[in-house]
Image (cartoon, rainbow, N blue to C red):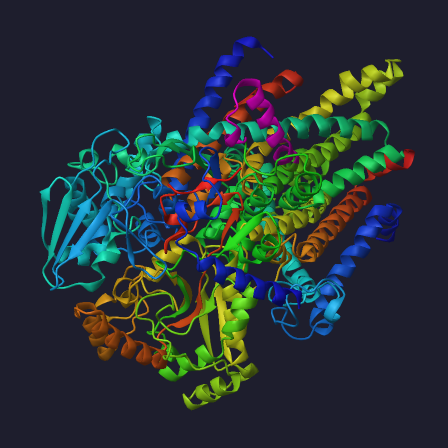
């Protein structure tokens, strides 16, 4: 573990990403302490620029505190990102494992199913799903998960395809280990690195997707998310730039942090690449 | 602070712009500006309408663009007095039963065929009777429609209907060519795709998602007009792009909801642009929060009164609508006929609102909330979202826990039509007269599973009686009596929470003259409009 | 690859594609019909008022009063004859509406795609070649920035900078119809209008391809056959072109095929911001207005496009990498 941490820490970008991520998570956790009351409260005069009226990041068109919105928005964006990624991983890993391990007709069927989902433009599908289920945090999470799992299936299947013919798997089979046990205890742990890396990137993509949906007016109207803030701020961008610049920055930094951490993980988890990295 | 000053300035500008409303080309001449012939008017059409034939579709963009092609018999002043359009004069018999319209004589359709009284009778008795559900009741009251000569149309009513003339604006009763529609499905006839009218501009080209092009009709019945060579309507779905277009001069006019209210102060400050809110008197759009009376607490008058008192209408008008419009005072807009200024809603008072809710038996529970309501956000743009967010915060202040539901246009319309909502918001046109545009939202007989009926399910026998009296009374004085009483009754009952008398801004480049001249504003035919050099 | 096997391969792929298309058609149809709200009530709502007679008239006209399986049957039969139905809202055949808008979307996504692939592969290759230097860091940072920034946000910023501040480029539309241009002048006008939307749509994917190219090139560079070539004294430039880049392109090609659908999705956002008259915007408008016929048509059309592109990538794959076996 400590070796892993040392490897991770060797990547300066990854450390910066991890620090940023911890800050964002901290902001989300302590939002109620930092900004007591609801982020929807009309706390001051509308359209106050940053710094005025005691509002660090200014106020929006109804006099709501943008800083409070960003702090509470961190909760929503992180929850949407994490939960939708978890759901997508669940679907993707299960299908990918079955396809890669069993092969044959199961592989064929699952890959056709995956292809099918990849054929429909995913963002269009997400819009459609959110619209049908009516925009709410649940429908947004479901929609993002439904369009995000196919890459997981492909990656997991590929890993399983290459791992299932390795000696240790064949040995386990010869020893009469049950397939489920082999998948869970022998293959999956060895396929974990790309899954972890993929998960951090998917969380980032999910946060971007949520903001895009909100931008088109398909956000949860009861959740103060960063996407909502940009959506409500973008039309007044030249009257109150701070309304969309700060939440945009928050998204950018969080997505960046997740990507940096993902790369750090990738380097730290992949000894072959690490060797190469050291050579340079 | 600056905001307030700008708004005051805006209000003054609005008022002065409304005064010389009937400035015709002649008046412009008197001011020393000779109408210049030539030039394209480039403007915006938003959202893109499905078709341009008025009647087949009556969305605002269809009406604004369609009125340049299709005309009506009359048009109306800001005070809602009739003016000639295709009818050069008209008479009403003393018993209020017979209406005779004398028509302009040298009018031709854009395909060159002559326009006659037959077209008028066909349009009224067949075309509009089928495609205009709102007027179906009115048109069913016509006992006889005849053409004494090719340029006279005569209608005899079964019983007097005082607002009858108000139905003859181009936006309500478009006059279409009999030879192009007779015997066809009115909604799918070729003329719907390629509209042919009597107006100053003829339809040329429509690149979907891009633009609509109209050109001057050389055979237009007013000699020497129109001044403009044509009109180019660009389709621009994004609000910021629209603002940019008018600012940068890529278009010289925006209408209706093209520009979001928050952009208006900045546009007012531009020396080359003129902003006015005049020209919507005929429609008088009224914004309200709709309360479904079937939802437990909302059946109680005291609850509705409390909710109405929790709304700071001045804040809403100044801060959310940026001074565009006026706080609503009741069910009838101040620019609609028979408005009674003495019927007033109780003022903004949070403490009193809470007391009323206490009296109604809704004591605060956990977290200070008394009961919960859902609010269905109308999916028509920014301002609707802000209004819904304001509603939620205002209601939470008095202990009503409001949750917002967002939706798309299809779901919104169908849920409202099926009474499947607790609260929502809406804007309805009043069409100049309580009988034409107000009655429909309150009378028991109009509780229907259709949008823009009395979907809230409000029912009060006395209100029904008064609207009926207002509908059938032969004289304006008698109608005023009924409508005054109904206004006093309704502000007491608050079946709906009237909030804003909406005034849509028309932004024009100052080179563009004679745009707003009537009570329908940008819905005029634009034969007088010209681009000064 | 054995050339005699190509027709069989093509046939199998075409057959499979056809099945996927039918499945997509059925799925789309059921999905959209599961949505609340029907087009008749939308039109009634938008026309300002309606009565039951009017609603019945509309429902009958739309065929909404027929059983669902009958509507599906009619839809499938029509699709097979390439008749995508009729939009009663717009009073136009759906195929016409889509064909009207398709060129605009193809132009936008095509330009964005070319920008993304050429720029991305070039930057990625450069970064891999100079791995560890400041150039690598700069390119990686730039790619990360584009990758982490919301698409529509980039669009807004570009508009603010190039249209509002600098007034260099038009901010919306595909051309200026007021100028009534023809020939080269029109193309020049369209090209100017294309710059900002294509840049907005392309930058994100440019970042994706740059990262992908860099990563795979580094991976390939480490593999035995490259080491062997190096040991044999093959010039470095040749190693890069013939061995590394060629193999590194494989995942890029795969990804490009998958990305085709994503680009079309992304064009909804971009077409909204820039008022670009393409099918992405058409689909979003149709969704908000519950124009079933148009929605089904757009989904069908984009799915077919993606299938065709995937087929093309498979073939390209076979050409680039002779070792890849072409099987069903």
Q: Residue furthest top?
A: C4
Quadrant of the rendering where the N terminus of chain B is positioned:
bottom right
On the picture, is C211 further left or further right than B24?
right
Magenta segment main secondary structure: helix
Q: Which residues are magenta?
A: C175-199
Question: Residue B520 placed where, x, y %?
Answer: 37, 53
Magenta stretch containing residue B208, yes or no? no
Where does residue C168 sit, x and y in percent of width and height? 68, 34
Q: Is residue B389 above or below residue C50?
A: below
Quick one: B218 or A214, which is closer to the camera?
A: B218
Q: Nearer the viewer, residue B169 or C99?
A: B169
| Front-lying residue, A5 or B458 | B458
Residue B137 figure quarter = bottom left
Residue at image position (55%, 56%) is: A219
> Percent position (x, y) of residue B82?
28, 56
Residue A137 appearing in the image: yes
In-front residue for pair A154/A80: A80
Residue C18 image-quadrant placement: top left
Whether residue C325 is visible = no
The picture places residue A70, in percent across and down from the top left corner, at: 68, 62
């Amino acid at each position: 573990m400590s070796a892993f941490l040392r490897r991770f820490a060797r990547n300066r970008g990854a450390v910066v990403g991890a620090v940023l991520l911890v800050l964002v998570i901290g902001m989300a956790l302590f939002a109620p302490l930092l900004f007591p009351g609801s982020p929807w409260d009309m706390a001051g005069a509308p359209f106050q620029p940053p710094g005025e009226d005691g509002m660090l990041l200014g106020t929006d068109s109804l006099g709501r505190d943008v800083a409070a919105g960003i702090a509470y928005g961190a909760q929503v964006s992180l929850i949407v990102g994490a939960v939708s990624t978890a759901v997508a991983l669940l679907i993707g890993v299960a299908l990918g494992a079955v396809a890669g391990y069993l092969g044959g007709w199961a592989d064929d069927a699952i890959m056709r199913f995956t292809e099918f989902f990849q054929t429909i433009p995913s963002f269009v599908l997400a819009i459609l799903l959110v619209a049908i289920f009516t925009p709410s945090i649940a429908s947004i999470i479901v929609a993002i998960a439904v369009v995000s799992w196919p890459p997981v299936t492909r990656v997991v299947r590929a890993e399983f395809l290459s791992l299932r013919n390795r000696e240790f798997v064949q040995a386990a089979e010869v020893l009469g280990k049950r397939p489920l046990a082999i998948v869970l205890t022998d293959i999956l742990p060895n396929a974990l690195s790309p899954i972890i890396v993929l998960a951090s990137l998917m969380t980032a993509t999910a946060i971007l997707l949520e903001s895009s949906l909100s931008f088109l007016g398909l956000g949860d109207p009861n959740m103060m998310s960063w996407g909502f803030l940009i959506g409500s701020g973008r039309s007044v961008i030249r009257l109150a730039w701070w309304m969309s610049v700060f939440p945009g920055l928050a998204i950018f930094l969080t997505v960046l942090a997740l990507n940096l951490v993902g790369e750090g993980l990738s380097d730290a988890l992949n000894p072959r690449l690490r060797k190469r990295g050291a050579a340079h | 602070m600056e905001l307030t000053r700008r708004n005051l300035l805006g209000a003054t500008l609005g008022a002065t712009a409304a005064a010389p409303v009937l400035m015709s080309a002649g008046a412009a001449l008197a001011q020393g500006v000779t109408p210049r012939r030539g030039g394209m008017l480039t403007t915006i059409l938003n959202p893109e309408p499905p078709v341009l034939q008025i009647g087949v579709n009556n969305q605002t963009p269809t009406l604004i663009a369609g009125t340049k092609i299709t005309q009506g018999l009359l048009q109306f002043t800001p005070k809602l007095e009739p003016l000639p359009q295709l009818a050069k004069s008209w008479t009403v018999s003393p018993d209020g039963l017979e209406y005779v319209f004398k028509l302009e004589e040298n009018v031709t359709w854009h395909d060159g065929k002559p326009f006659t009284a037959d077209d008028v009778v066909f349009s009224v008795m067949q075309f509009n009777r089928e495609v205009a559900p709102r007027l179906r009741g009115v048109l069913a009251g016509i006992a006889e429609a005849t053409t004494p000569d090719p340029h006279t149309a005569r209608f005899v009513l079964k019983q007097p209907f005082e607002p009858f003339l108000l139905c003859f604006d181009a936006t309500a009763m478009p006059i279409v060519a009999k030879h192009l529609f007779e015997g066809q499905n009115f909604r799918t006839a070729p003329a719907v795709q390629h509209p042919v009218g009597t107006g100053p501009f003829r339809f040329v080209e429509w690149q979907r998602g891009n633009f609509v092009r109209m050109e001057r009709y050389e055979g237009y019945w007013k000699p020497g007009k129109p001044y403009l060579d044509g009109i180019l309507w660009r389709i621009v779905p994004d609000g910021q792009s629209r603002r940019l277009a008018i600012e940068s001069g890529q278009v010289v006019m925006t209408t209706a909801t093209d520009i979001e209210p928050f952009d208006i102060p900045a546009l007012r400050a531009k020396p080359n642009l003129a902003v006015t809110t005049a020209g919507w008197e005929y429609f008088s759009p009224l914004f309200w929060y709709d309360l479904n009376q079937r939802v437990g607490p909302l059946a109680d008058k005291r609850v509705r009164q409390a909710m109405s008192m929790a709304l700071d209408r001045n804040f809403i008008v100044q801060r959310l609508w940026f001074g565009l419009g006026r706080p609503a005072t009741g069910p009838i807009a101040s620019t609609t006929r028979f408005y009674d200024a003495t019927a007033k809603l109780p003022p903004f008072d949070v403490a009193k609102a809470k007391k009323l809710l206490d009296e109604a038996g809704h004591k605060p529970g956990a977290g200070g909330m008394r009961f919960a309501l859902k609010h269905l956000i109308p999916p028509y743009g920014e301002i609707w979202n802000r209004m819904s967010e304001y509603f939620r915060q205002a209601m939470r202040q008095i202990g009503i826990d409001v949750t917002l539901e967002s939706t798309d246009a299809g779901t919104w319309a169908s849920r409202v039509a099926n009474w499947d909502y607790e609260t929502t918001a809406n804007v309805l046109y009043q069409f100049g007269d309580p009988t034409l545009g107000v009655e429909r939202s309150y009378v028991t007989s109009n509780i229907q599973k259709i949008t823009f009926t009395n979907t809230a399910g409000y029912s009060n026998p006395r209100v029904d009686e008064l609207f009926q009296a207002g509908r059938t009374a032969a004289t304006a004085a008698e109608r005023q009596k009924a409508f005054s009483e109904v206004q006093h009754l309704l502000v007491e009952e608050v079946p709906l929470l009237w909030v804003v008398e909406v005034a849509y801004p028309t932004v024009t480049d100052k080179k563009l003259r004679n745009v707003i001249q009537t009570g329908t504003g940008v819905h005029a035919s634009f034969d007088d409009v010209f681009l000064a050099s | 690859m054995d050339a005699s096997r190509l027709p069989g391969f093509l046939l199998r792929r075409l057959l499979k594609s056809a099945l996927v298309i039918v499945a997509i058609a059925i799925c789309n149809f059921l999905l959209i019909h599961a949505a609340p709200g029907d087009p008749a009530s939308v039109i009634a709502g938008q026309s300002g008022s309606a009565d039951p007679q009017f609603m019945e008239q509309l429902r009958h006209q739309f065929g909404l009063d027929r059983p669902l399986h009958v509507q599906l049957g009619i839809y499938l039969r029509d699709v097979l004859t390439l008749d995508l139905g009729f939009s009663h809202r717009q009073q136009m055949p759906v195929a016409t509406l889509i064909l009207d808008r398709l060129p605009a979307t193809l132009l936008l996504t095509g330009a964005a795609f070319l920008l993304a692939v050429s720029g991305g592969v070039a930057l990625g290759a450069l970064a891999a070649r100079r791995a560890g230097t400041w150039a690598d860091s700069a390119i990686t940072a730039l790619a990360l920035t584009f990758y982490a920034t919301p698409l529509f946000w980039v669009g807004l910023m570009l508009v603010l900078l190039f249209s509002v501040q600098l007034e260099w480029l038009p901010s919306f539309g595909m051309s200026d119809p007021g100028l009534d241009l023809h020939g080269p002048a029109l193309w020049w006008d369209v090209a100017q209008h294309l710059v900002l939307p294509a840049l907005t749509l392309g930058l994100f994917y440019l970042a994706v391809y740059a990262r992908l190219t860099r990563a795979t090139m580094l991976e390939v560079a480490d593999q035995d056959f490259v080491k062997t070539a190096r040991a044999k004294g093959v010039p470095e430039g040749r190693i890069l072109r013939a061995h590394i880049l060629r193999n590194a392109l494989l995942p890029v090609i795969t990804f490009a095929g998958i990305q085709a659908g994503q680009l079309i999705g992304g064009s909804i956002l971009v077409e909204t911001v820039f008022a670009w008259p393409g099918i992405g915007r058409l689909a979003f408008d149709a969704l908000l207005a519950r124009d079933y016929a148009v929605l089904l048509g757009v989904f069908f059309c984009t799915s077919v496009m993606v299938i065709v592109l995937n087929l093309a990538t498979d073939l390209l794959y076979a050409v680039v990498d002779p070792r890849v076996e072409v099987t069903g």
